[in-house]
Each structure stands twice: as structure tokens, then as C-alpha cells.
Image (cartoon, rainbow, N blue to C red):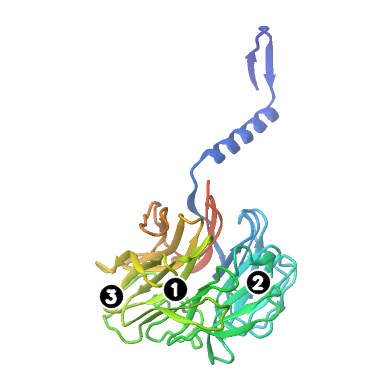
Amino acid sequence: ILKRRNRENKTEVFSPASMRVLAVLLGLVAAANAAPFWRILNGSLATDIIGIGFTSKEVGYVSGDANGVGPIILKTTNGGVDWTPCEATFGPDILLLDLDAADDTIVVGSVFGELYSDDAGKTFKESYGGGMSQSIRYIGKDGSGGKKFAATGTFNFQKTQGCAISTDGGKVFKSYSAGLFTEARYGVFPNDQTWYIAAGSFANSNSAVAPKRRSEFQDDNGRFPLHYTPKKLGTAGYAAQISKTTDGGATWKTVFAENGTFYFNGIDCNPSNADECCAVGEASASSQPGARIYCTTDGGASWNRTFWAPEASGTGYSLMEIRYVSPTEIWAVGGELKSIAPSAWFLQSTDGGKTWSHNVKPIFGYMAFSISVVDSTHMFAAVDDLITQMSGVAKYAP
């Protein structure tokens, strides 16, 4: 019990309950004033977490797989502290891939087509017209209230490389060929007319054979190596391409093309200007192994490599995804692979992609796989724990 003298020189007594309330209030004030940082929130959520999407700083979803259970979709309502399975029934052979969410709508990609929920994850149903989508994104700033989504990947029984668009919350998709000479991997859809597809390939990268293998560093089961060994340098199988449409998929133009050096992963654009975009790429055994970020400020007419981490001294570098927070703030996630153990990477730009800083400590033992941005102080990332061979979620917050 705490006592003090007031102005009338009388003794005031504070009970333990009052002190607890005061401690909570002080903690909230301290948290509000604290600088946000990345930390592991739950490192053993499932065997594989591939997709992640948050609609607020409290509500979010992940998709993946759990040994002994099969495909799973989990939901949190308290900022990732606790997770519960969504009521969804899957066949034993379905492999869930990426996920995105807007308002009460969630769309999930899989090797056999897309799934959707229009009731905040209470139920999931099969979509029509899609295919095997490696990337799911809502269109525009909020998917028009959870109605417009895009899937990037392979459609029409492996005949179409490009994207598929839904304007009814994921119920029905219409596919578009993006005029690619390599595999469609990731996409961004700033508005109803302007879309970018980031494509690429590496040796034995056929997504139809090993859909979990999104990175050259991974094995066919989607696992990054705990102990990394550099590969023999070469050029075979490497291709990087970005294709763009400005008329809602009617016509496409290649705005970036390069062979023999690397392949693209994630791509994103300034939420206020569809001409300003950045894409991440990587390579392990090419003639130019390393991780890189290319950015454009003129709609793809020119691209500048604004970040470059060449493989050196037996350390490989991977960048998997990228997201704009604002016109100036951008985050890219991935990791560095070493002979001992990996470390998750969180790269930040505060000048629209001109420069990048690794201003947070790498998280030892993990690889960051994908990212979901709520605001400048609340972000979430899907991560792999290479030591335990489990997957979980990292959080950026005060």
C-alpha cells in the first residue's frame, strides 16, 4: 500500500488495485511513446505459413499447413497474440499458398484454385475461374470494400501466365495473359486499370512441380536451408521480367527484361502514384548472385537498382516481398543465409526507395517470407524458424 501527504497534510492511501490500474495506464503511455520495432510474436504457429493479411492492427489471417492437420487458415483478433482455426474444410491434397484480406473478405490461393470468405473467416468457399496463384492482392487501396481482388500465377490448366481478377469478393475470377516469357510470380494492382506482374525463373523453378518453392534458396518443400552452401555460378534458367497494363488487362507491355542474372519476387507501388513502384529480386547460383531492389518513378520506362547485396564470403541474400507504407516509406523482407544459421531481414526506405537502411537487428534463426502493412507503426510478417522447422509471425509495433 502506498501513502502520501496531500495539501491539507492528510494521509492518502492507494490500494493495490489502484496501483495496478496506475501501472497499466503508465504502461499504455510508455507503449504509445515507444519506437516500433520488429520481434517474433509466435514462432511456432504451424509447419508452414505462406500467406498473411491483416485488416487492422488487431484482426488478421494466415494460411499454410500443419503436420497432422493439413491445410489451415488461422485468425487473430488481438494483434497476433492468439490464433484460432477458421471453419474451413479442405481436401487432404490441397496446398494453400498466398492470402490477402480487405474488410470482411479473405481470398486464399491454392494449387487447385482460390478460396474466399465474405464473413470475416467464418466460412470459406471455392472460387471459380482461377488457377494456381502464387500471389493474392486486393486491388486499389482497400479492394473497393473487399470486392476487388487479383491473383497472380498460372491459369487455364497451366496455359496462361499472368493474373486473374475478381470483382465480387473472390467468388469468380477472370484470367488475363500478361505476355510473359517466364513464370508469373507476384503482382500489384494500384487501381482498376494499371497492373504490374513481376515474373521470373531459376533452374528447376517450375511452380507446377514444386509450388511451395518460391525461392531458389528453398527446397521442394518450401524450406530454407539451416546451413547454406554457395552454389556454382552460372546463367542457365534465370529470367526476370515485369509486364504492365494500363487498360485493365486488354494489352500488356514488358517494361523490364533481363536474362541470366536473377529473378523477381514481390512488387509494390506507391498508394498515391501508380508510376512509382519497387520490386525485389534475388539469385543464388547466377553470374550475379545476391539480393536487389529495382525502383521506377516513371511507370516502368526506366528502372534503377537502388539496393544491392552481392553474395560474399559464403553468405547468400534473399528478398521475398515488399510493401509501401506511404509515398516515402517502404519495407522489404527476406534474410541472409549463412553456413551456421540464417537471419531475417527487414529493410526500410524513407525516401521512396532511393536509399535503404537495415536499421533493425536481424532476427537470428529466421527468414522473413511475406509482409502485411496496417500503418506506419503496425506491420506483420510471416517468418520461418529454420532451427525448429516451424513457421510463425513477426510483428512491428511499439
Instruction: Say which residue appears at 60% left-offset and 84% top-offset.
Output: 175
Label 2 CA crowd tier, 10 Å (few <14, some 14–19, many 20+): many
Q: Secondary structure at mark 2?
A: loop
Instruction: Say left or right for 100 vs 218.
Output: right
Point out residue 239 in the picture as x, y percentages from the top left corner: 37, 82
| Above-or-below relation of 171 to 343 | below
Residue at 39 percent across and 56 percent down: it is: 362
Q: Which residue is mark 1?
A: 265
- Of residues 249 and 138, the one nearer the viewer is 249
Quickly name the residue at label 2.
148
Measure the alpha-carbon separation of dots 1 and 3. 16 Å
Which amino acid type is shown beneath numbered disc 3? Gln
Please tell me whether mark 1 sits on a helix, a strand or a loop.
strand
Residue 50: horizontal and vertical position, in percent? 54, 71
Percent position of residue 394, x then y: 52, 58
Closer to the N terminus: mark 1 or mark 3?
1
Image depth: mark 1 or mark 2 in front: 2
Question: Mark 2 belongs to which amino acid?
Answer: Lys
Residue 364 image point, x, y percent: 40, 58
Report which residue position mark 3 lands on.
288
Task: Report how far apart the C-alphas of labels 3 and 2 lie in the structure.
Answer: 38 Å
Q: Secondary structure at mark 3?
A: loop
Look at label 1 and name its amino acid.
Answer: Asn
**Res. 369 in view:** no
Classify 77 as above or below 341.
above
Is residue 255 visible in the rendered image? The answer is yes
Q: Earlier in the sequence, mark 1 or mark 2?
A: 2
Question: How many numbered marks, from 0 up?
Answer: 3
